[in-house]
Image (cartoon, rainbow, N blue to C red):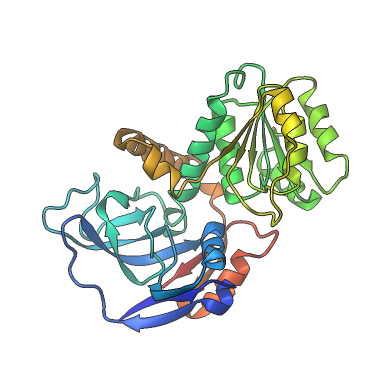
Amino acid sequence: MNQRVVYTRGGSPAEVLTVIEEPEPAAPKLGQVLVRTTAFPVHPGDLHAIGAYSGEAADLVTPGIEATGVVEAIGPGTHVAPGVEVGGRVTVFPQSGSWSQWFMADAEAVVAVPKELPDEVAAQMLANPLTAVMLRREAQEHAAFGYDGFLVQTAAGSSVGRLVTGVSQFHNFALINIVRSERGAAELRKRFPDVPVVSTEHPGWAEEVRKVASGRPVSVVLDAIGGNMAGSLVDLLAPGGKLVSYGMIAEEPISVHASTLVSKSLTLRGKNIISGWPSEASPERRASDIATAKQIALALTDQFDVAATYRLGELADAVEHAARPGKVGTVLVRP
């Protein structure tokens, strides 16, 4: 039997999610790969999608966008990426409905896992590293960045934030990290002692960022928070600067007066790795980005923290933990 996570309406994930049993999937068809899941991550975006789901679904909906596992079968005549073979370890992203013991994946989303990576890292090998690649590209598109401009990022202690820091160090980017607590700042300083960290726990945090920048322009801000904080981040930007919003941690909307945007010629940009990257990138760009994501996973393995690992029978505990403020690392579920 196959165990699969499902829901039919939006709401608190711990309340609306349930696990059903059903027959194992049939043999894959052209363009499909049957994967037996060994672990899947619970991303914040997964929980947001469940909570924001509107109406009542006519059919059962299975959450999830990423998982790692073993190839059970490949559809006849199906073209697969190098290294993908029956019995081989793979990671799948973006793949809707991956919270299941077995699932049928689109062949284009299936990527072979380097043998050096354990399942705990393989389960996180694509979504977060690809987000870091996407954000790095957004920063490098700014004309001043890389010459004299600073890059600032919020939620720097998150899984994505730590990867952005590692990538920035590799490329010698001038980076200032922002976190929400002094405790989080202390933890991040231990990991990256050469990168300045500012905590918004202190009322004068914005002025502290300016002090660290020492008169150099803040060219780009990568923001995973949103809400009221965005106004202060926009104020930090130099004329011609850019704020890239890629997360929705804050409940309230972003509020920025048009005069600020106009007078400083600022750019506000929203990015989404789940829908934006597959549709915006060419096949060649996607292949290049996936290769880079693998290299990030291999080079920064110690930054792929696991907050906890749960079984499917502990799903309510898993999603509660994934939404817990201050957690370090990604929550994984092993079917």
Nearer-the-camera pick, 268 or 311? 268
Q: Which residue is drawn at 56% across and 48% down?
A: 303
In the image, residue 214 above or below residue 19? above
Residue at the far top: name it.
147
Q: Residue at x 24, y 73 (%)?
A: 25
Q: Quadrant of residue 51?
A: bottom right
Report x, y in % for residue 299.
48, 40
Q: Is residue 46 visible?
A: yes
Nearer-the-camera pick, 255 or 1? 255
Number of marks present in the image shown: 0
Q: Image quadrant for the C terminus? A: bottom left
Report x, y in % for residue 84.
24, 51
Residue at the far left: name it.
77
Residue at the far right: name it.
203
Q: Residue at x 80, y 22 (%)?
A: 214
Q: Is residue 238 visible?
A: no
Nearer-the-camera pick, 68 or 132? 132
Q: Which residue is drawn at 46% across and 58% down?
A: 120
Q: Is residue 71 left or right of residue 188?
A: left
Report x, y in % for residue 279.
38, 42
Report x, y in % for residue 141.
53, 25
Q: Quadrant of residue 122?
A: bottom left
In the image, residue 2 above or below residue 177? below
Q: Image quadrant for the N terminus? A: bottom left
Nearer-the-camera pick, 154 or 258? 258
